[in-house]
Image: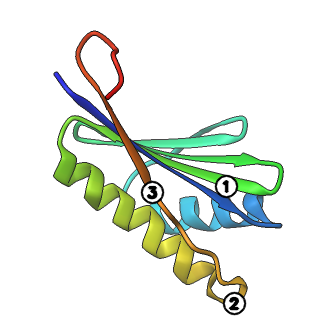
Amino acid sequence: MTTHLSRADVPTDAPARYAKQLVSHLGRKVAFVTDGPTSTATVNDMTLAITVAEAVLTLTVTGTDPSAVARGEHALGSHLERFGARRDLKVTWTRTTTDGEGARR
């Protein structure tokens, strides 16, 4: 089975604040679990992750259905861009796929 992984590394001087805001807002619809710097939520066969690092917020969406992954990208990306509009945050996604044996394409 093919797995689709989409990742966006968003430079910001306030990654923890934006992560908290995303988790709080999106947490109204899906349950996020926070473990250290990463908060994750599972929706059907898709996983959303928000990871805080120094000066960067990393968003990842993983799933087997490319249209579900696109919906996850939209949910995370559009909300973050709206929350960070004053600082002109831009989310740019990069997608990779792996086959059932872990080979990247």
Residue at 62%, 68% (x, y): give it: 21
**Residue bearing mark 2:** 86
Q: Position of residue 4 (x, y in %)?
A: 30, 37
Residue at 38%, 66% (x, y): give it: 75
Q: Position of residue 82 (x, y in %)?
A: 53, 82
- Category of crowding for the residue at label 3, using alpha-carbon neighbours closer than 10 angstroms: few (below 14), some (14–19), many (at least 20): some
Name the foreground residue: 80 vs 3. Answer: 3
Q: Amino acid at mark 3?
A: Trp
- Category of crowding for the residue at label 1, using alpha-carbon neighbours closer than 10 angstroms: few (below 14), some (14–19), many (at least 20): many
Residue at 63%, 76% (x, y): give it: 89
Q: Position of residue 34 (x, y in %)?
A: 61, 40
Q: CA distance from mark 1 to mark 3?
A: 13 Å
Q: Visible in this render: residue 29?
A: no
* Mark before the other along the chain sequence, 3 or 2: 2
Q: Quadrant of residue 1?
A: top left
SS category of the residue bearing label 1: strand
Q: Amino acid at mark 2?
A: Arg
SS category of the residue bearing label 3: loop
Mark 1, mark 3: which one is toward the viewer? Answer: 3
**Residue bearing mark 1:** 57
Residue at 24%, 20% (x, y): give it: 99
Mark 3, mark 2: which one is toward the viewer? Answer: 3
Quadrant containing the C terminus is: top left
Residue 93's disc is 3
Q: Is residue 32 left or right of residue 54?
A: left
Residue 35's disc is none
Asked if labels 3 and 1 touch by Cβ distance under 8 angstroms, the answer is: no
Name the foreground residue: 45 vs 57. Answer: 57
Above/below status of 4 relative to 99: below
